[in-house]
Amino acid sequence: MTDLALLRTSEGTVSLRRAVIEDLPSIVELLTDDPLGAARDGTDGADGLQAYVRAFEALDADPAHLLLVAETGGEVVATTQLSFIPGLSRRGALRAQVEGVRVRADLRGSGLGRALLLWTKGEAERRGCALIQLTSDKQRSEAHRFYAGLGFTASHEGFKREL
């Protein structure tokens, strides 16, 4: 497992790397560590990780996607997914989509989330993206302030429909 970067936080240095299949339980734990995530993610028994395994395998096999984890002391403490989407709009621009940004509760406020997002921005620039985008549930007002502090703007109204 090769580090992509070392991220500096107020708690020390955290290594950033591509996720491996063994990270899935820790990633799912991060995804469920709030009321919104707990309502839509999680596992039910021994077979509960199978949907995550299928998704991981698809992400890992496609170079347009990076599933990342930050770790310290052998423990996964943060995660995010960075996907690169070609499109015709904006003169055929490549865009970076950030998904599933999560930092372990005891490290929130340490600068880890900021370092993680700044790394994703740099990677998007390195790959020639014209913009980086993300969505955040309307109930996550603290997250909105965090993203705004990093230069993201609430420029669009998003729509979703469950299938």
Image (tube, rainbow, N blue to C red):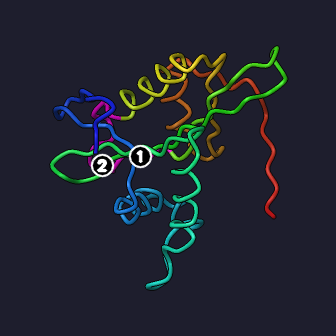
Residue 31 location (% of width, % of height): 47, 57
Tell me which residue sits at (62%, 29%) in the image. 96
Quadrant where the C terminus lies?
Answer: bottom right
Circle 2 crowding by C-alpha within 10 Å: few under 14, some 14–19, many from 20: many
Residue 102 location (% of width, % of height): 43, 47
Residue 105 magenta:
yes
Numbered disc 1: secondary structure: strand
* Numbered circle sitting on residue 77: 2
In the image, the segment drawn in magenta is 101-112
Q: Nearer the viewer, residue 140 or 53?
A: 53
150 horizontally vs 4: left or right: right
The image quarter in which residue 51 lies: bottom right
Circle 1 crowding by C-alpha within 10 Å: few under 14, some 14–19, many from 20: many
Q: Are marks 2 and 1 in contact (CB under 8 Å)?
A: no
Quadrant where the N terminus lies?
Answer: top left
Tell me which residue sits at (61%, 47%) in the image. 139
Q: Is residue 49 above or below residue 59?
A: below
The amino acid type, in three-letter code, at marker 2 is Val
Residue 134 magenta:
no
* Numbered circle sitting on residue 79: 1
Q: Is residue 59 above or below residue 11?
A: below
The amino acid type, in three-letter code, at marker 1 is Thr
The image quarter in which residue 20 lies: bottom left
Disc 2 versus disc 1: distance between alpha carbons?
Answer: 7 Å
Q: Is residue 41 above or below residue 3?
A: below
